[in-house]
Image (tube, rainbow, N blue to C red):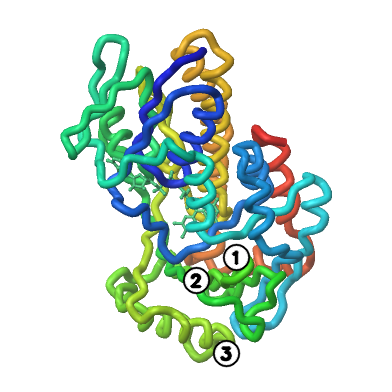
Amino acid sequence: MENLKVVIIGAGISGLSAGVALREAGFGVVICDPDPQLVSGEAGVSMWPNGAKALHALGIGSTLSRICPIVTSVQYRDKRGSLISEIPLSPLVETVGQRPYFLTQKDLHDALLSQLGQDHPILGARCLDIKPVGDKVQVILDTGQRLTGDLVVGADGTRSEVRRFMFGNVPLRYLNSIWRTLIEQDNTLNPSNVFTMYSGDQRRVGVQPVSGRHLYLFFEAPISARLDELDRGVESLRTLYDETWSGIVHRLIERVNPLVKRIPIFDFDPLETFVRGRIVLVGDAAHSMAPTLAQGGALAVEDALVLARHLRSNATIEEALNRYDVERRQRTAPIVIAARHRTETILGSDREKTEHWYERLRSGHHDFVETLTQLTLEGPVR
Ligand SMILES: Cc1cc2nc3c(=O)[nH]c(=O)nc-3n(C[C@H](O)[C@H](O)[C@H](O)COP(=O)(O)OP(=O)(O)OC[C@H]3O[C@@H](n4cnc5c(N)ncnc54)[C@H](O)[C@@H]3O)c2cc1C
């Protein structure tokens, strides 16, 4: 198809990626988001090779390859800091032909925005309603504007309003909580080429070099933690990671803003469809998942590419959306479930199961590289 106009609701990773992919396919795009400045927060993001390849297909790979550090291994350490396992990334990179990109969310957003160029999103504008008008769809914004398109893309995240217009309330499942922040790269805390995970007591701390100048820190609470004990800013971290944890973890906590906010993690059961009429979901709105496999952002970029490809190569919008729906549900549903299970294994209360998982890591019988290889070789950009 040609000459479609697409209205995209939300300017996170999925909305911006959809904007870039659809514009590259020759369509008109308009994007809206209530956030007046598109604040992306103090966070990093891992784009494992499937995500990195998808970003190359969007045209921003070379920018990212310049700014992202070359990380050569992932180290799992126990809570005292002793090495459990070091997993070199070279076998993964050699098999799939792409290294992962570890970067700040801001750098990813900026690269996507710059690739969008003049189609900069309308900011400070929330979608209030969506209505069919003839064979078009109209989006009503809280600014009073009305945007009319041939198609609406719901890219408005886990608590998607667009999904609610389409299917009513979909129950979210609370999994656990995470705190995250960025600090300056500091080799006394973590080497600049190693992604380190400290684990113990059904909780984890991740330290990841991102964008060549920062360390991205994340702290994961156990699933069983009482919510009322988790909202005391950095005090909650001091309680969760007590004196039995490595001195490095304590030094990391000292670098966290005392008012750091807890992020509750939700997923929902795979949807029966991502499409209703001329409205289609992408990213977390379609398949929010636990971040344990670090796949939500990568799959959002894949969604964007696949949607644009089907719209370009099918005769009608209905056929294109149907193909997108089947392909992306098949791809994403097993990953949502695998991420949920991995979270339950690592952060859940079955200590034996957790120990067994780390024992496999220690003995070298893990599937870290195989899983990421398979995710890449089964993805839409190989
Ligand atoms: C702690 C954590 C760590 C993660 N780590 C990784 C990782 O390492 N690798 C990875 O690939 N993924 C990771 N993810 C997942 C990844 O961050 C998400 O999958 C991705 O950001 C989803 O992007 P999105 O654009 O779909 O949704 P969002 O980022 O939620 O964006 C939705 C946008 O829609 C806007 N919006 C909301 N309502 C409306 C409305 N009514 N009208 C208009 N706009 C609206 C919002 O303002 C927002 O800008 C992580 C997630 C978490 C929570």
Mark 3 / mark 2, whichever is N-terminal: 2
Between label 3 and label 1, give the one nearer the viewer: 1
What residue does disc 1 label? Answer: 210
The amino acid type found where label 1 is placed reads Val
- In this figure, which residue is indicated by the disc labeled 3? 247
Three-letter amino acid code of the residue under disc 3: Gly
Question: In the structure shown, which secondary structural element does the residue marked by tag 2 occupy?
Answer: strand
Q: CA distance from mark 3 to mark 1?
A: 22 Å
Q: Nearer the viewer, residue 203 or 27?
A: 27
Give the mark nearest the N terminus, 3 or 1.
1
Q: Residue at x 37, y 40 (%)?
A: 121
Residue at the spot 58% in from the left edge and 86% down from the top edge: 248
**Tag 1: Cα neighbours inside 10 Å, few (<14), some, or many (≥20)?**
many
Q: Is residue 229 above or below residue 14?
A: below
46 or 85: nearer the viewer = 46
Q: Would you name the residue on which mark 2 appears?
A: 182
Look at the image and tell me whether residue 337 can be seen: yes
